[in-house]
Amino acid sequence: MTEKNYLITGAHGFIGAWVVKRLLAANAGQVVMFDRSADPRRLRLIMDEDEIERTSFVAGDITAANTLPPIVEQHGITHIIHLAGLQVPSCKADPRMGAMVNVIGTINVFEAALHSAGQVKHIAYASSAAVFGKSDDTPQTEDKAGNTGSHYGAFKRCNEDNARIYFLDNGISSIGLRPLTVYGVGRDFGVTSDPTKAMKAAVVGRPFHIRFGGRTDFLYAADCADAFIRSADSEQEGAFVFNLHGETAAIADIIAEIETEVPAAKGTITQAENIMPIPAELDDSAIIATLGDIPHTSLRQGVQETIARFKVLHEQGRLDTADLDV
Ligand SMILES: NC(=O)c1ccc[n+]([C@@H]2O[C@H](COP(=O)([O-])OP(=O)(O)OC[C@H]3O[C@@H](n4cnc5c(N)ncnc54)[C@H](O)[C@@H]3O)[C@@H](O)[C@H]2O)c1
């Protein structure tokens, strides 16, 4: 088997840290991390220093055209998992910067692959369920996307189109994935981070208000990471875009799961009534048909694992709660 060298953009972010962890656990190949932030705090929440030392890190800004090609060349990168990006609130606050990072940054990833003269075999990149607008209550297939309610969703949709053009014009194969509410240790920012913050608040004995209600599609971080790795490893030729689906549940259900794990938190976690303008359930039959069955952790198990880890970090005095204040 030829050696695989992975470049993870946004590796110091939440999903990035989990992708690194799962790649190292699978001994999948060389792991090169790229991020604008040099702060490895999310890696340290879920990995030992010994594990982190098995990776390389390059700091840089993905919006700069000349940043990625030398990294791809020097590290012999064969697979790219592109996660660097700005989330909904940041894109809303500064759409120009949002477009630079989310759209131009993604163009720069494809350009780096293009200029690698075939060395980069495949790209997996983060799209989002935010490409969907308001909808009925049925599981949404990929083709129902459109009418997004955010600049962020518009940028992600634009990336999906650009990925398709890179395949048509240049034969660069890619898979874009659309997660919705990803949760787990390290999730500390963005609209859908509130369920994870509620788990952390329960562990430290603080009340917490989840700023949305209704139902949503919960995806455990480890499963999300595995889907990105599986997509990067795919040898399918083409530009694919797939929904990811975890477990669709009401916010009230996840509060009940948290209360089961931390009985002292009963009644301390509340929720808003407003519903996110994104469908609550994504149909993932397309990715399963193309890549085979993908890992699926139940909401109960995911909440249990997350709270168990938060408890360990809290006991060790390593649980940062700054995200609960905003
Ligand atoms: N977390 C979710 O529930 C979710 C859902 C759908 C889609 N996504 C997408 O998945 C990807 C990863 O999400 P996340 O939750 O890990 O986000 P995150 O905010 O935790 O991580 C993003 C990372 O990108 C880095 N970054 C930002 N601007 C950069 C730049 N100019 N150059 C280099 N690096 C830069 C940040 O430093 C950060 O480490 C994002 O593209 C996001 O839009 C996330």
Image (cartoon, rainbow, N blue to C red):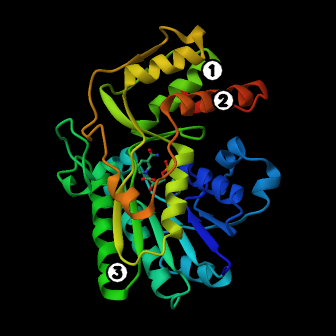
Q: Work out whether mark 1 precedes mark 3 in sequence or the reverse, and give the earlier one.
A: 3
Left or right relative to 27: residue 125: left
Q: Residue at x 35, y 73 (%)?
A: 239
**Which labelled disc corresponds to residue 215?**
none
* Residue wearing tag 1: 203
Asked whether the residues under the numbered discs 3 and 2 touch, taking CB atoms below 8 Å apart as contact, a structural biologist would say no
Question: Quadrant location of residue 77?
Answer: bottom right
Residue 145 visible in this rendered orientation of the protein: yes
Q: Residue at x 60, y 50 (%)?
A: 18
**Amino acid under label 3?**
Phe
**Amino acid under label 1?**
Val
Left or right relative to 251: residue 59: right
Asked whether the residues under the numbered discs 1 and 2 touch, taking CB atoms below 8 Å apart as contact, a structural biologist would say yes
Question: Quadrant location of residue 313?
Answer: top right
Q: Is residue 121 above or below residue 43?
A: below
* Residue wearing tag 2: 310
* Residue wearing tag 3: 167
Q: Residue at x 66, y 32 (%)?
A: 320
